[in-house]
Image (spheres, grey):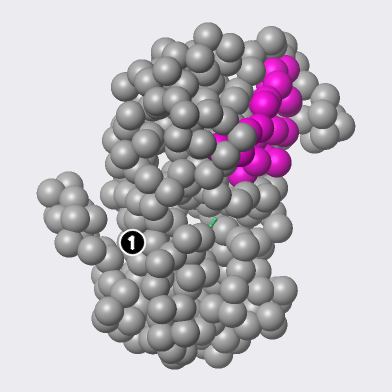
Amino acid sequence: MKHFINLKDIPSRDLRKIIVDAKKRKKKRKKLNTLEPDKGSPLKGKMLVQMFEKASSRTRISFYLAIKQLGGGTLTLRSNELHLGQGGETIADTAKILSTYGDGFMLRTDDDKKIEDFQKHLKIPIINGLSPSSHPTQVLSDIFTVEEIKKKPISKLKICWIGDSNNVLDSLIAASVKFSFRLSIGCPKKFAPGKKVKDWVIKNKKKIFIYHDPKKAAMDADVIFSDKVISLNDKVNKKRKKQHFQKFKIKKEIFNYTKKNCIFLHCLPRGDEVEESVFLGKNSHVWQQALNRVHVQKSILLYCFGKLR
Ligand code: CP
Ligand code: NVA
């Protein structure tokens, strides 16, 4: 049994194996309908319980499809429907119950500590479906999308992030170390990556490049990533934070600085950090990116259930 909590704690070879498996599975099911299981139904009879403390569209639907396509099923819960969410039951007891009924647990939470606590008490694998410090299923799937479109290993590409230093960026930074790609970040000084994540990069003898000018960050890039300036439950003065990001709004002109075939990716949902003409423009592959969540999460589930070939 393996957990999937933070990319930084998962060996690079396992992450690569997940991507390779996802690629094979995606190719093989081209002729199958949405809910038809993959050949052999490798997770037949298994149930994934997913619990959301925050809103989600993509993560909940893509995990539903992922386990279905492996022959299993899912139950989706909002934490406030449980005794746990009402303050009437502990994580320890809830974890025991989840382990009694279910085979895997996916949690989207406001609190990294909750994932740790669940991990301690669960007898089934836990998957981080977004926490304040990380969005690992999103970013691993994004690596898959980049390689699918660019037809090259990501280590040969220049990746740029323009936006807030949030959970998605933290996972992208972890991925830059695990997959050895060059990552340049364009963000306001006040919203640059924190010391903890920078120290971890240094400890791993790698480098990230931080610029406070979006054009410098985008120079020669093969991929530009972005995300909302205001994340779910971001407890900041929203108006003031958005002002800091004004000159980081992604406009068509940014592609004058990148490589010619630079692509644009965004995990969604979007805010006003990117112009419509970019988001819906020819460089954008955001819908393919969202779809690939299904394919990569299937291989993540197989990894967690000890069934990755
Ligand atoms: N990208 C992503 O995780 O979307 P949701 O918040 O809709 O799940
Ligand atoms: N950074 C965003 C990602 C949403 C998928 C958030 O945490 O809200």
Q: Is mark 1 within 8 Å of ligand 2?
A: no
Give coordinates of residue 56: x percent, y percent.
Answer: 62, 50
From the image, which quarter does the N terminus lie in?
A: top left
* Depth order, front residue of 40/269: 269
Q: Nearer the viewer, residue 109 or 87?
A: 87
Count of all numbered marks drawn on residues in the image: 1
Which amino acid type corresponds to the residue marked 1 in the rendered image? Arg
Mark 1 lies on residue: 182
Q: Is residue 24 left or right of residue 223?
A: right
Give percent across and percent down for residue 220: 42, 76
Q: Is residue 204 visible?
A: yes
Q: Is residue 245 visible?
A: no
Q: Residues within 10 Å of mark 1 (few under 14, many from 20)?
A: many
Q: Nearer the viewer, residue 92 or 289?
A: 92
Residue 205 x, y percent position in the rendering: 15, 51
> In the image, which residues are magenta?
59-79
